[in-house]
Image (cartoon, rainbow, N blue to C red):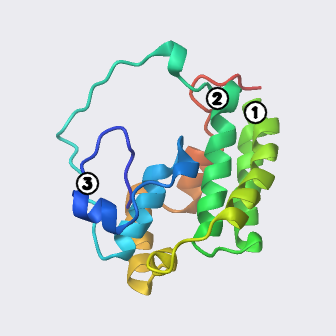
Amino acid sequence: MTFVGAGHAIRRSDFEAAGGYDDALFFCWEEFDFALRAINMGRRIRYRGDIAVRHKVSGERRFAWNGTRWYHFVRNRIYIGLKYGAGLRSLLPRFLAYQVKGARNGVLAQGLRAGPAALRLAQAFTPNPEEAALYRLSQAARDYLAKNDTAHRGGLPRRVRAELLAALPGAATR
């Protein structure tokens, strides 16, 4: 299990030990990237559904799906996979699924541009020697992620319906 960055608290010592947020991910998936490193350090994510976070949404500052939001979503998720050692072959089904979803929602061009951009980010990524181990997920971290991911997102059929076939909020669907 990871978390959505809209409302969260992190111990400063853990944030610093995990290397904080990756500046390349300024929008979309930065908390997922951080959570992977924290989980790899043996930390766990605690969900509190009884806490509400409210914030003013500024329309003029919002990234729209038909702007660059889908590009960042796809680029950053593929980059994170590469950063943590996934091969291109293992990321291809995810990338293709994103292209299907992008085509269904009128943002295919963004998704197609995102692939090469993710490769460029990954090629430029070089963790310092002290952080390098954080980007090789331990078996315990992989087990924790698999167990919690399935518990919260369901199996493959549910995920296809909920994540691949669902429309992007506010996107122009075809």
Query: How far across and how far down the image is residue 51, in percent?
Result: 18, 38
Depth check, mark 1 against mark 3: the one in front is 3
Inter-mark Cα distance, 1 to 3: 34 Å
Q: Which residue is mark 1?
A: 107
**Helix, strand or loop at disc 3?**
loop
Q: Quadrant of residue 170?
A: top right
Question: Of the residues under marks 1 and 3, which one precedes in the sequence?
Answer: 3
Inter-mark Cα distance, 2 to 1: 7 Å
**Helix, strand or loop at disc 2?**
helix
Vertical relation: 70 (above or below) 16: above
Position of 156 with respect to 98 (left or right) is left
Mark 2 touches mark 1? (CB < 8 Å): yes
Q: Quadrant of residue 125?
A: bottom right
Type of amino acid under label 1: Val
Query: How far across and how far down the image is residue 115, in percent?
Result: 77, 53
The residue shown at (17%, 40%) is 50
The residue shown at (34%, 76%) is 41
Type of amino acid under label 3: Ile
Position of 139 with respect to 98 (left or right) is left
Depth check, mark 2 against mark 3: the one in front is 3
Number of numbered discs present? 3
- Farthest residue in the bottom direction? 139
Q: Which residue is mark 2?
A: 65
Query: How far across and how far down the image is residue 143, in percent?
Result: 41, 79
Q: Which residue is mark 3?
A: 10
